[in-house]
Image: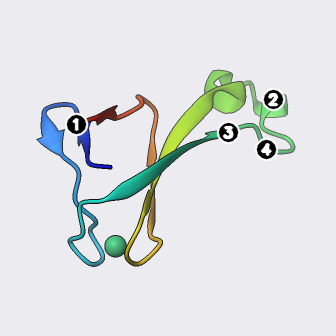
Amino acid sequence: MQYVAGDTPVTCPCCKHDQFDKDYRQLNSRGATFFGLDWANKEAAILICQNCSYIMWFMKSPKSQ
Ligand SMILES: [Zn+2]
């Protein structure tokens, strides 16, 4: 699947591939709430390059094309 982040089609910075799998990950890590980081429990979208498996993280979920 191809994705758009903002207005820009996403390409892999590692291998320039443009096909990705999308998944979601919680951002909370141990001790984060202690420091009052509000984003710590939010969910981030990740795109995994289908060619080289490079992972990109997004706070706003990229749209599929
Ligand atoms: Zn790649």
**Residue on which the image places disc 4:** 29
The amino acid at mark 4 is Ser
Q: Which is more toward the observer, 13 or 37?
A: 13
Mark sitting earlier along the chain (2/1):
2
Res. 56 image quadrant:
bottom left
> How far separated are the C-alphas under marks 2 and 4?
8 Å
Residue 27's mark? 3
Residue 35 screen position, x and y as percent: 76, 32
Going 21% across and 31% down the picture, which residue do you hit? 6
In the picture, measured across the screen, residue 6 lies left or right of residue 39, that is: left
Q: Nearer the viewer, mark 3 or mark 1?
A: 1
> How far separated are the C-alphas under marks 3 and 1?
26 Å
Q: Which is more toward the observer, 32 or 24?
A: 24
Residue 65's mark? 1
Q: Nearer the viewer, mark 1 or mark 4?
A: 1
Q: Are marks 2 and 3 in contact (CB under 8 Å)?
A: no
Residue 60 screen position, x and y as percent: 41, 28
**Residue on which the image places disc 2:** 33
Q: Which is more toward the observer, 31 or 55?
A: 55
Q: Are marks 1 and 4 in contact (CB under 8 Å)?
A: no
